[in-house]
């Protein structure tokens, strides 16, 4: 718990009384329900910038009233909310027994510290604000302003014109689809959430690459499914293993990122894709293909998506504007067999009544005018330069510690240490030095002794500075 | 199933072959999976605008190949997808065994027909496009254009400034909250979805007014909770009954719409609210207060919300811009004890990574400039006039069939028939006459012999025309 409140030192009310009032308010409002663990007195005195003895007196008073209780070395807890006549629901109990798992602890930390000032984000999977096409966006919004006639509830699948434009766009990637096979979502994470509650039964298994971005989310586990890893080669997912694992028409499913895999950056080869589709068609395996990074190639264009090779409706294809344009627009799409898309649309009408019309209007403009075609070359140039800078810094400062892939696109460099590194400690130590890391363990079923570095987000200066700082920390975290 | 495709009558390919190809494509792409029921031959020939005999020949051919099967009077079904070498996953099975319930059948129909042209929507709970403040929205978007610096992933709780502005706004309604007690959501439906998966355990009961808007949704049931009704009086929820039902600190919860209740329009009195809060505090009952309609009063301002009387953190308050401004912006808020709000924010980061930044930027502008304060008087005038028109039409055409409340605000007139009416039939007959109705049964635990009429959506002309048309249909649906 972080207390940002501080007593007013020039007030006529004593510091003691101010702090008691503050605690009273927090506890009786339910912000600190019974069971909340309080920071240690030393930390409290730092956080509120008062003497330790003042804090001690307050705590003693609260204890004597039974409001808080010391459990020895386990810390001090809110034990009672007499002030509220014990009238509060037991929120902690409610939260604990509810359905969804909390986010991964490290992900929670990342979500939190991302918004701290002065932090260098070395692992962040989105384009830097520097790369945001501000002028283009302004033009689009002004255009949108003339187009907004009303903002009523929308069709569950999303605006028809937007779905048509996405079909047209997908033809460039070998995918034939009609608007009825397209659902507009509020980004890929929502697409996955919809699939988890609308297409899978409790207890079924979602097979994913090990490591995989999906392992850092609890989307499927919270809905009662299991995740299971399938190994990868340099060519992509291990198809031999896939063949051994899957029987015909089982209730399980494969989730894969064949193009600029997150987090490893691996590009699945054309042969690998062919082989994968053969197994999938033979065993009738439903596949979710996550194709978020396709447009972000730097050296050569990637092979066609699995969906373009899908003659029998095995593949559910998910795409997004988050990686190529802006995550904040929260716009993605699912392309699949019509009953699947209809089903997901029906559920979307039960969880948020459709995606923001403003986002849909801007997305229409984006596709209609082919803005990406123009923006693409500037973006690629910047990403190329950033990749060079990150790789240069790794070579300069970190080459003695480990090895990495050279990604042909996407955002990520997957760095694996030679010696065993305590990556949990590395995360904490880096954070203390204002460097935010995405450690590999959050993406994997076992400790993979790796970290995911991203050249997309931090400024060019911070990429160099961040890697330099990190290199100084690594030796402290090598395990013997 | 509605087939909108038609064969090309001037093509060199025979109609027969074109239709076979079309069926082949639909079936092998998975759009019509095994188990799909096909329209009757007569309907097929109408839909595709070809002779019935042509359709018959095609069907015979498909049957001889085992692709489709006739089950006598039950209809004709896709039985096989040989064309795809049987390689498709069994999507229907996947859908059937997955977690979420499909939407209520009538809600599905309403969701569908709302977007049909020429339909008069007599029950729709949103402002008419006519009432949309277009010029204001244009101004806001142009202003937003200058403000968009980047659109990166956002903090889980939503933009800090927006949360602060909402706190400031809520002070007008007697609610004291700090930004850490506010979560921005993509509308109230998402707020409910988050609550269902983040705060309640499977098997617990959500008590609601009978009838209630919430009964038409399966949000809580899909997450494994039960709904249970509590009666209403003219003063609001039956507090006596509440007192009998709830024990201390149970895992159950109360969801209530005290202000311009949906669907009945009932306004809970000041005394009723006081009595309700007493029970709630005494029994430590968690309460969700849905306050979507507060600003839409026409005669006198409503009593203060429950949340303003909540000294102990019992009440989770949900609000939205959907009813006062525009549903398409998809913006709502949850105000509650900090651990609850934090928990919901953490889950939001697992289901869609936050609400559209575009929507948040426009919402900031809306609150910051106090646009509603200006728009309010125009809106109230229009709604007053529309209420007068709807009530006038009911008095003129429908007064012999039943009785209604006179709502002091909100959108709804709850009309209850004197004689037993087959409301399912009424819905269908009205639909056939291009009038879309929200029948009362979708909101209730039993047939309540009522319909929800709305003066907010249909044009003034359509309000009159729709009620007139409806009045001609009602006699056909009275049961003897």
Image: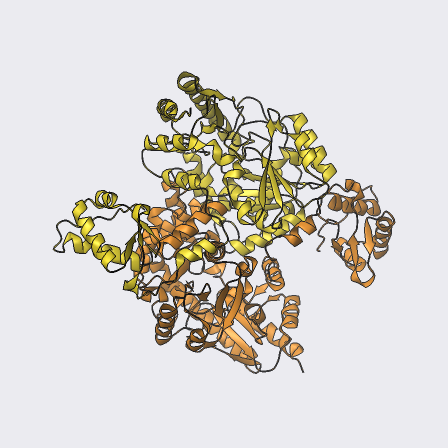
Chain colours: A orange, B yellow
Quadrant (top left, top right, bottom left, bottom right) of the C terminus of chain B: top left
Q: Position of residue A383 (x, y in %)?
A: 43, 67
Q: Residue at x 59, y 24 (%)?
A: B234
Camera sees residue B353: no
Residue at left offset 56%, top offset 33%: B210
Point 32% across, 61% down: residue: A175
| Residue A478 in the image: above or below residue A61 | below
- The image shows residue B254 at horizontal and vertical percentages of 63, 39
Q: Is residue A176 left or right of residue A83?
A: left
Residue B346 image point, x, y percent: 59, 54
Is residue B54 visible in this depiction of the protein? yes
Considering depth in this image, is A132 or A21 the residue closer to the camera? Answer: A21
- Name above or below for residue B330 compared with residue A211: above
Q: Position of residue A302 (x, y in %)?
A: 36, 70
In this image, B52 relative to B380: left or right? left
The image shows residue A311, relative to residue A407, as above or below, that is: above
Q: Residue at x 58, y 65 (%)?
A: A120
Q: Image check: B381 left or right of B228?
A: left
- In the displayed structure, A331 sits above or below B450; it is below
As rendered, which of B69 and A199 lies closer to the eye?
B69
How many numbered marks have been drawn onto this rendered protein structure? 0
Q: Toward which corner of the image does residue B401 lie, by quadrant?
A: top left
Q: Residue furthest front?
A: B72
């Amino acid at each position: 718990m972080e207390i940002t409140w501080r007593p007013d030192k020039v007030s006529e009310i004593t510091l003691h009384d101010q702090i008691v009032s503050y605690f009273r308010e927090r506890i009786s409002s339910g912000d600190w329900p019974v069971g909340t663990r309080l920071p240690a007195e030393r930390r409290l005195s730092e956080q509120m910038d008062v003497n330790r003895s003042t804090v001690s007196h307050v705590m003693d008073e609260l204890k004597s009233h039974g409001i808080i209780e010391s459990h020895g070395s386990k810390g001090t807890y809110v034990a009672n909310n007499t002030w509220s006549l014990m009238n509060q629901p037991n929120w902690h109990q409610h939260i604990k027994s509810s359905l969804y798992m909390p986010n991964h602890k490290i992900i929670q930390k990342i979500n939190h510290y991302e918004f701290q000032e002065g932090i260098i984000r070395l692992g962040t999977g989105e384009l830097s604000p520097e790369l945001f096409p501000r002028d283009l966006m302004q033009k689009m919004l002004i255009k949108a302003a003339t187009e907004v006639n009303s903002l009523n509830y929308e069709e569950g699948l999303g605006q028809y014109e937007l779905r048509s434009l996405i079909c047209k766009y997908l033809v460039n990637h070998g995918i034939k689809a009609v608007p009825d096979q397209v659902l507009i979502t509020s980004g890929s994470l929502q697409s996955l959430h919809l699939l988890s509650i609308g297409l899978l039964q409790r207890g079924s298994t979602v097979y994913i690459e090990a490591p995989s971005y999906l392992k850092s989310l609890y989307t499927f586990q919270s809905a009662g499914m299991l995740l299971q890893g399938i190994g990868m080669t340099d060519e992509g997912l291990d198809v031999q293993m896939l063949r051994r694992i899957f029987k015909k028409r089982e209730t399980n499913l494969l989730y894969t990122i064949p193009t600029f895999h997150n987090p490893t950056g691996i590009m699945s080869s054309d042969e690998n894709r062919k082989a994968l589709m053969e197994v999938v068609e033979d065993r009738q395996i439903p596949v979710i293909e996550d194709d978020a990074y396709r447009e972000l190639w730097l050296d050569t264009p990637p092979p066609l998506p699995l969906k373009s090779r899908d003659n029998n409706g095995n593949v559910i294809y998910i795409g997004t504007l988050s990686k190529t344009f802006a995550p904040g627009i929260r716009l993605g799409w699912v392309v699949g067999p019509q009953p699947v898309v209809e089903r997901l649309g029906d559920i979307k009408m039960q969880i948020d009544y459709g995606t923001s019309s403003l986002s849909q209007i801007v997305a229409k403009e984006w596709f209609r005018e082919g803005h990406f075609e123009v923006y693409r070359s500037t973006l690629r140039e910047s990403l190329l330069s950033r990749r060079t800078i990150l790789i240069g810094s790794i070579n300069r400062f970190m080459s003695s510690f480990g090895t990495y892939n050279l990604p042909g696109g996407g955002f990520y460099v997957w760095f694996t240490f030679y010696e065993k590194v305590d990556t949990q400690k590395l995360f904490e130590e880096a954070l203390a030095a204002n460097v935010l890391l995405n450690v590999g363990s959050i993406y994997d079923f076992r400790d993979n002794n790796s970290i995911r570095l991203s050249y997309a987000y931090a400024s060019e200066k911070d990429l160099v500075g961040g890697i330099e700082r990190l290199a100084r920390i690594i030796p402290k975290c090598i395990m013997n």
